[in-house]
Amino acid sequence: MNIKTLLAEEKRLGLNCNYCGRFRYLNHGRFAPSTPVEAIAKTLTCARCGSEDVETFAVTRTSEKGYWPAERS
Ligand SMILES: [Zn+2]
């Protein structure tokens, strides 16, 4: 999945730190439409603990009219 597909499917870009568990949404406007969602993690580190062990992925709403999963620090 790339940014273009992410937007088409009305998903959001999530960043999770595997070290400290921080989860945040990223502004997809920073990335080109052709950028693979998983590749973005390679350019980032965790803003809280500085770990490079982060992953980026598409986040879906919890239900059709539901909420987005909450950010976590
Ligand atoms: Zn972290």
Image: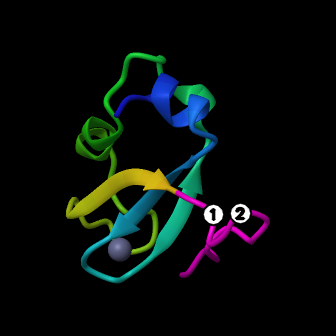
C-beta proximity under 8 Å, tags 1 and 2: yes
Residue appearing at x 39%, y 16% in the figure: 34
The quadrant in which residue 45 appears is bottom left
Which residue position holds label 2?
Answer: 64
- The amino acid on which the numbered mark 2 sits, given as a three-letter code, is Glu
Q: Quadrant of the N terminus?
A: top left
Residue appearing at x 62%, y 28% in the figure: 29
Q: Is residue 65 above or below residue 10?
A: below
Residue appearing at x 57%, y 38% in the figure: 9
Furthest-right residue in view? 65
Q: Quadrant of the C terminus?
A: bottom right
Q: Is residue 65 above or below residue 14?
A: below
- Residue 39 colored in magenta in the image: no
Residue 61: numbered disc: 1
Q: Principal SS element in the magenta part?
A: loop
Relative placement, left or right, of 44 versus 61 is left
Residue 25: image location, x then y, percent: 58, 57
Magenta span covers which residues? 60-73
Residue 14: image location, x then y, percent: 48, 56
Along the viewing direction, whichever of 43 and 72 lies nearer the viewer: 72
In terms of image quarters, where does ligand 1 lie? bottom left
Residue appearing at x 66%, y 70% in the figure: 63
Q: Secondary structure at mark 1?
A: loop
Residue 27: image location, x then y, percent: 62, 41
Q: Is residue 24 above or below residue 38?
A: below
Q: Secondary structure at mark 2?
A: loop
